Image: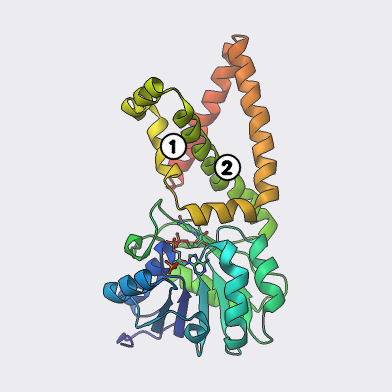
Amino acid sequence: MPRASGATPLFQRLCLIGAGLIGSSIARVAQERGDIARTVVAQTRRPETLQRVRELGFADVVEADAARAVQGADCVVLCVPVGAYAGVMRQIAPHLAPGCILTDVGSTKGSVLRDLAPLLPEGVHLVPAHPMAGTEHSGPDAGFATLFQGRYVILTPPEGSDPAAVEKIAELWRRCGSMVERMDAATHDKVVAIVSHLPHLIAFTICGTADDLAEETREAVLKFAASGFRDFTRIAASDIDMWRDIFLNNREALLEMLARFTEDAHALGRAVRYGQAEFIEDRIKRGRKIRRGLIERHQA
Ligand code: NAP
């Protein structure tokens, strides 16, 4: 049912390709506010997800077919794992309406330009975006309307983008409660490699290392997990498809950060071996300083 809000909606027909954690959260904000879109279309492919999206009722129209879903939309948001973009784009490109804004929420941005730009029809505007908000949960049940509040959203419009289209996507995110920043795709990919992708790589690895331990030791790890290990397990519980795709689609930046991290970790290990207390203290102090900085910026 189209929304009944007094405010002028930003879009007439907003189409979300993918209705998991992020897509369903956008739909929920749109449903709550009423000034984001007159009609919200949610597309998802698997019958069980489709059924659940219908039951949850956060979209006006629910579609299984991506090509049909985008028809007549003035804004299309890709909310699927980044590895699925090229395939989805092949399906939807011929059906995107002239003047439509194509945006996304993907966690890697160089790959988005690589996969979407070559198939972009004339007259369709591409404005990639990445909300720096999420949880370790996935699927349509995991979404909630306050997910983006007080969080940053990074826009990476390619050079020569239509300023009006960029402004509309910025406004979409402001209406979701986010702070909007703009940077180029390569800078974005480096930043997220260190703040998000490397921490996930470390979390997956440390859980694997713990799992490889002898039975007796592994039991003790689980029993006494509150000492720090537990925080890694929360990150390591993330979605398989999404993280496989992120690692494969931000390869260069992630490997660069991993190499730097490995050097630094070895340096700290060396300080431990040779009893260099000052070096160790210095590393701990830097960690504490970064934590304080996050708290001051309300990002903790
Ligand atoms: P999600 O909860 O797992 O939902 C994924 C959605 O994409 C579902 O509707 C799923 O549909 C569909 N999908 C999965 N694989 C597909 C494929 N190969 N082809 C077409 N559709 C497919 O994922 P999410 O957490 O919302 O993540 C979506 C995007 O947001 C990703 O690009 C991710 O990088 C980005 N992101 C995530 C977070 C986070 O913390 N989760 C934060 C910021 C950005 P079916 O169930 O029908 O298969």
**Which mark is drawn over residue 5?**
none
| Snapshot quadrant of residue 86 | bottom right
x, y percent for residue 227: 37, 26
172 lies left or right of 194: left
Residue drawn 45% across the image and 56% down it: 133
Residue nearer the viewer, 167 or 93: 93
x, y percent for residue 118: 72, 75
Residue nearer the viewer, 59 or 178: 59
Q: Is mark 1 within 8 Å of ligand 1?
A: no
Location of mark 1 (residue) = 232
Q: Amino acid at mark 1?
A: Phe
Is any part of residue 191 visible from this angle?
A: yes
- Which of the image's four quarters has the C terminus? top left
Vertical arrangement, residue 109 with respect to residue 214, above or below: below
Vertical arrangement, residue 145 with respect to residue 233, above or below: below
Task: Identify the element where label 2 is drawn.
Answer: helix
x, y percent for residue 123: 66, 87
Q: Amino acid at mark 2?
A: Leu
Q: Which one is earlier in the sequence, the residue at label 2 or at label 1? A: 2
Residue drawn 35% across the image and 22% down it: 220
Query: Few, some or many C-alpha atoms within 10 Å of disc 2 (few <14, some 14-19, many ≥20)?
Result: many
Is any part of residue 166 visible from this angle?
A: no
Residue drawn 56% across the image and 47% down it: 197
**Which mark is drawn over residue 198?**
2
x, y percent for residue 74: 52, 85
Alpha carbons under labels 2 and 1: distance apart? 12 Å
